[in-house]
Image: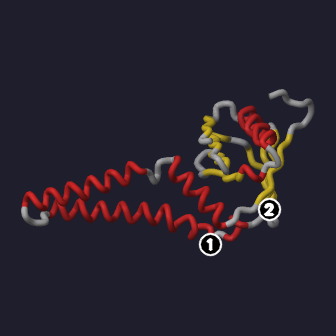
Amino acid sequence: MRQKDGPEEVRASFSLSRAEYIRAVRYYLRKSHLVSWVQIVVILLALAASIVMSVLMERMSFLCTLLVVLAVMVAGYGIWLYFFQPGRLYDKNPELGRPVSFLFNREDMARQDEKTAVLLDWDLKKLWRGKEFYYLFRGDEGYLLLPKSAFRSEEECLHFEYLAQAACPKAKMKHFD
């Protein structure tokens, strides 16, 4: 992609709906393997092992009970984390649904909402591109979430990616499209 002379900037403005936020967080949970099909298989195997051990021993031993309790706890936590927590976070933090604008250039990124404006260093460790969202992982701060619909065109998306890679050449880029 050939770049123009002079200052290069990309603007992204958006406000996330509750449904968009939930979809984005669930996508992150799946892609980061915090919630995955492997966990379901392990839980089912633990339950099957406890049933087989109970049948063979003709009673519910402490180990069987422990396996069942742990499997139920892990399953419950996964269900809570995936199905309930994203909506709760959105409801508890009304600023997640407020309009926000980002301006990206080679040196830094500016974030502005109705209450504050802040200049941020790129400081990217990872950049994920999903079907609907960008996830910008900055240090230990978690991630910034940007919907791809906040950009006016696919060309602006590519230009944003170029600016991110130019500002943080060591950042790892993943495409999940």
Percent position (x, y) of residue 72? 32, 64
Disc 2 residue crowd, few under 14, some 14–19, many 20+, Cα 10 Å: some
Q: Is residue 32 above or below residue 155?
A: below
Q: Residue at point 67% right, 50% down?
A: 133
Q: Which coloring applies here?
A: secondary structure
The earlier-in-sequence mark between 1 and 2 is 1
Specify the quadrant of the image occupied by residue 91.
bottom right
Q: Tally the numbered discs.
A: 2
**Residue 110 visible to the viewer:** no
Q: Amino acid at mark 2?
A: Asp
73 displayed left or right of 107? left
Q: Secondary structure at mark 1?
A: helix
Q: Residue at point 63% right, 46% down?
A: 130
- The disc at residue 91 is 1
Percent position (x, y) of residue 154? 78, 42
Q: Amino acid at mark 1?
A: Asp
Q: Secondary structure at mark 2?
A: strand
Percent position (x, y) of residue 52? 15, 56
Q: Residue at point 44% right, 64% down?
A: 79
Percent position (x, y) of residue 86? 56, 64
Specify the quadrant of the image occupied by residue 88.
bottom right
Q: Looking at the image, which is closer to me, 167 or 26?
A: 26
Going by the picture, which residue comes out furthest to the right? 6
Q: Which residue is mark 2?
A: 113
Disc 1 residue crowd, few under 14, some 14–19, many 20+, Cα 10 Å: few
The reply to whether discs 1 and 2 touch (Cβ–Cβ < 8 Å) is no
122 displayed left or right of 4? left
Quadrant showing the C terminus: top right
53 displayed left or right of 104? left
Q: Looking at the image, which is closer to me, 78 or 106?
A: 78
